[in-house]
Image (spheres, rainbow, N blue to C red):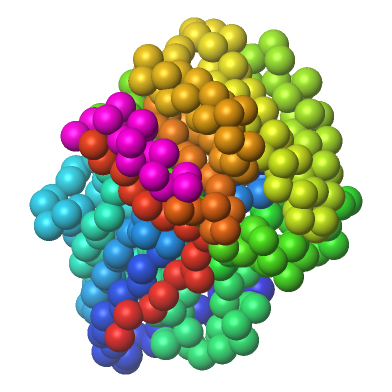
Amino acid sequence: MEKYSDLRLANSSDVQGKVTWHSPSNLAIIKYWGKHGVQLPKNPSLSMTLTNAVSKTTVEYRQRKNYDGGIDVNFLFDGIENAKFKERIQNYFDSIKSYIPFIEQLHFDIASENTFPHSSGIASSASAMSALALCLCTIEDELFKTLNDIEDFERKASLLARLGSGSASRSIFDSWALWGQTGDVESSSDQYAIPMKDLIHPVFHSFHDDILIVSSSEKAVSSSAGHELMDSNPYSGIRYDEAKRQLFYLLEAMKKGDVERFGKIAEQEAMSLHALMMVSNPSYILMEPETLAIINKIKSFRKQTGAHIYFSLDAGPNVHVIYPAEESEKISEFIENELRKKCVNGLVIKDKVGPGPIQID
C-alpha cells in the first residue's frame, strides 16, 4: 500500500473507465473543530454514518497523451459547471499526487450531486470528498490491483478523503466511525478513520437522525475558516482536552447501551461547538432563532414525556434530532406536529444510521 511511486502508468498504456460511488454524510457526536499539520485533528471525533444524506459522484477517466505534472479535470455539480468547486478539486488532486501519482497522467470528467443542501452545515464535504476518494481508490485498484484487500482499500480511501475534508475520513465506514488517535481505542489514528460498529451496543446501530432544515443557504463562515479561527481561540486548549474526556465517557455509554448518557454528551458537544464560534476572533453565530426555538421544544417534549429525544448541531443552523428506533412513532409525530413548521419550506430529511458507501455499477 505504501509503494506509491509504483503507481504510474506505462507510456504505452491506453486506459479509460468510469466509476460511480454513493457516499453518505455523517454526524459527529464528538466534534472535530481545530486542526494542525496537513488535515490532522486536534482531538479525536466519533460520528454516525447516515443513510439518505448522500453524494453521488461519477468519475470518467482516460489517459492523457501529454502531461506536465498539472491536473486535467472537468467538474459538474448538479449538472452545472461550478468554478469554485472545480478549483477545490484541482487543488485537492494536487495535494494527493504523492499518494496516487497516476492522476496526473489521466483526464477526469467528474459529476457530483447531493440529496441535501450543500454548504449549509450538513457535512456536504464529508459525503462529496469521501465519494471522490472511493472513486480514486477504485480506479487505482482497477489499474494496478493494489487494493484488493478491503481493509487496505478502506484505509487508503479514508486517508485520501481526510486530505480533502477531515470529516470525510469517517464517511468511508458504515454505522459508526472514529477518527483521531486515542488511547481509548486500539488502532485509532490521526491519518485515517476506523470502523466502530462492533464496539458499541446494538441500540445505536439503528438510531434515527431527522435533519431539520432551518436554512438551506450557504453558511456565512465556512468550516475551513472556522477551523483556522481555532488557532487563536483562547479556549481551544480547554476544548481539546474536554473533547478527549467526552470521548471516553461517550464510548463507555455506547458500549453499555446508555442512551440517556449518550444524549447528554451529544447535546453538550453541539452547544460547545457553537460556543467556540461565539468566542472566536472575529466571533460569529451560525444558529438562527428557529434553531434555538427547536432546541427548546425538544427539551420541553423530553421533560414532559420522558422520550429519549436529543439534538445535535453541525457547523450550521440546522438541527439533527436523534433518537432510538424503538421510539420513532412517538417522536416522528412530535416532529411532524411541532417542529416541521419551523423548517424552511417544511423541509425535514428523515435519516438514520446507515450501511455506508455503495459502489454503483
Q: For this rendering, which residue is in front, 125 or 334?
A: 334
Residue lying farthest to the right in this orientation: 183
Residue 278 seen in render: yes
In the image, is residue 228 above or below residue 324? above
The structure residue drawn at horizontal position 84% and vertical position 50%, both measured from the top left corner, is 252
What residue sits 67% from the left and 61% below the top?
Answer: 203
Residue 214 is left or right of residue 176, and the answer is left
In the image, residue 71 above or below residue 106: above
Quadrant of the snapshot with the N terminus: bottom right
> Does residue 184 show up magenta in the picture?
no
Instruction: Identify the residue shown where x is 52% and y is 30%.
Output: 301
Viewer-closest of 185 and 81: 185
Q: Is residue 25 left or right of residue 99?
A: left
Residue 92 in view, yes or no: no
The quadrant of the image that shows the C terminus is bottom left
How many marks can you see? 0
Place of residue 279 in the rendered image (x, y in percent of width and height, measured from the top left) = 59, 10
Q: Which residues are magenta?
A: 330-345
Name the main secondary structure of what is drawn in magenta.
helix
Q: Quadrant of residue 21?
A: bottom left
Residue 313, x across and y down, in percent: 51, 33
The correct choice, above or below, for 160 with respect to 262 in the image is below
Snapshot quadrant of residue 127: bottom left
* Residue 25 on image: x %, y %: 44, 53
The image position of residue 38, as x and y in percent, is: 60, 44
Q: Nearer the viewer, residue 338 or 353?
A: 338
Specify the quadrant of the image occupied by residue 244.
top right
Tell me what residue is drawn at x 44 percent, y 14 percent. 285
- In the rendered image, the residue lying farthest to the front is 305
